Image (tube, helix red, strand yellow):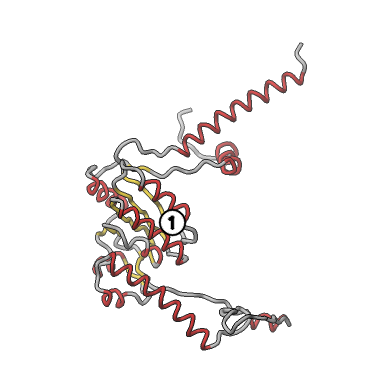
Amino acid sequence: MKSPWVVVGIVLGALFLVLIVVLFAVGLRDTESGIGGKSIGLVEVQGVITDARTTVRQIRHFTKHSDVPVILLYVDSPGGVVTPSQEIYSELKRAKAKGKKLVVSMGTLAASGGYYISAPADVIVANPGTTTGSIGVKLELPNIEGLLKKLGVSVDVVKSSEFKDIGSPYRPMQPEERQLMQGTIMDVYDQFVSVVAEDRNLPKDSVLKLADGRVLSGRQAQACGLVDSLGTFNDAVAIAGALAGLGDDPRISRPPKPFRWRDFVMEDVVARFLMPRLSYLAW
């Protein structure tokens, strides 16, 4: 009769082998490019733009594949931080410089930074009711001086020069500080306006008339030249397919999701084995 420890070892070994097989299958699924012939490369930007790394990596993935002649960028974002928006924009420009066509499909919202990253597209498609535009820049600095006074707390600052603590939340902003910050804001604003004017082939004066922070519907944006066509995501897919010579129902490739053990342990196992799911399954 086999020792109980031997039986336990066999069972654990079998479970380990099963785990290895599952991990391999998940890794294969998540790391394959999905590109096995001519297709449209789909990149999605949703939510507030705070980090460009994932989006830039996805754009580069499709840029290096000759079987992806067109990148379809789906944007449903209110914008976000300036620098990540500029990084995504720059990567899209590099993709175009290497011969890729770019089509943008706007979802519910593609405003401010969401419009900024859309600007270099060969074709921008928006729904008639898409909220877009909002060309402008803002800087919000909290002031908690009043709260600290109520709490009987004060903050002493030792600084190397007059403007070193500009924007401090512990005191009101001084007029000369506001003037300096306004200059910075206007410089970044001018960059935004220049991008729109150049990429949309519009006179800068025309863009300035729209660049007061106002939001526009998709239909209004089309009338102003900020959007090329009105339609749905499927319409944008058809346009991308036509640009690629793949017809109006092209195959769509999605970027690979890098496989990480942490993700498998923290997400996949829970999602696969522990979370209750309603399913339409035959068995």
Which residue is at a point 58% across and 40% down the rendered structure image?
261
In the figure, 35 relative to 95: above or below? above
**Identity of the residue drawn at 30% across and 54% down:** 96
Q: Which quadrant of the structure image shows residue 106?
A: bottom left
Say whether residue 105 is left or right of residue 203.
right
Q: Residue furthest front?
A: 160
State left or right for residue 125 relative to residue 155.
left
Q: In the rendered image, is residue 263 in sight?
A: yes
The amino acid at mark 1 is Gln
Q: Which residue occupies the extreme top position in the image?
A: 1
Dot 1 corresponds to which residue? 46
Q: Where does the image place residue 160, in percent across and percent down from the top left? A: 62, 80
Q: Position of residue 281 (x, y in %)?
A: 46, 32
Residue 259, compared with residue 168, is above or below; it is above
Which image quadrant: the N terminus?
Answer: top right
Secondary structure under badge 1?
strand
Nearest the camera: 163 or 171?
A: 163
Place of residue 231 in the rendered image (x, y in percent of width and height, measured from the top left): 27, 56
Look at the picture and state if 255 lies above or below 169.
above
Q: Residues within 10 Å of mark 1 (few under 14, many from 20)?
A: some
Residue drawn at x 26%, y 75% as measured from the top left = 206
Q: Please count the marks in the image.
A: 1
For this view, does 133 lie left or right of residue 247? Answer: right
Given residues 45 and 51, the one toward you in this image is: 51
Q: Position of residue 201 (x, y in %)?
A: 24, 67
Quarter of the image for residue 78 reads bottom left
Q: Is residue 104 above or below residue 223?
A: above
Query: Is residue 275 in view?
Result: no
Instruction: Give the residue drawn at x 42%, y 55%.
Output: 45
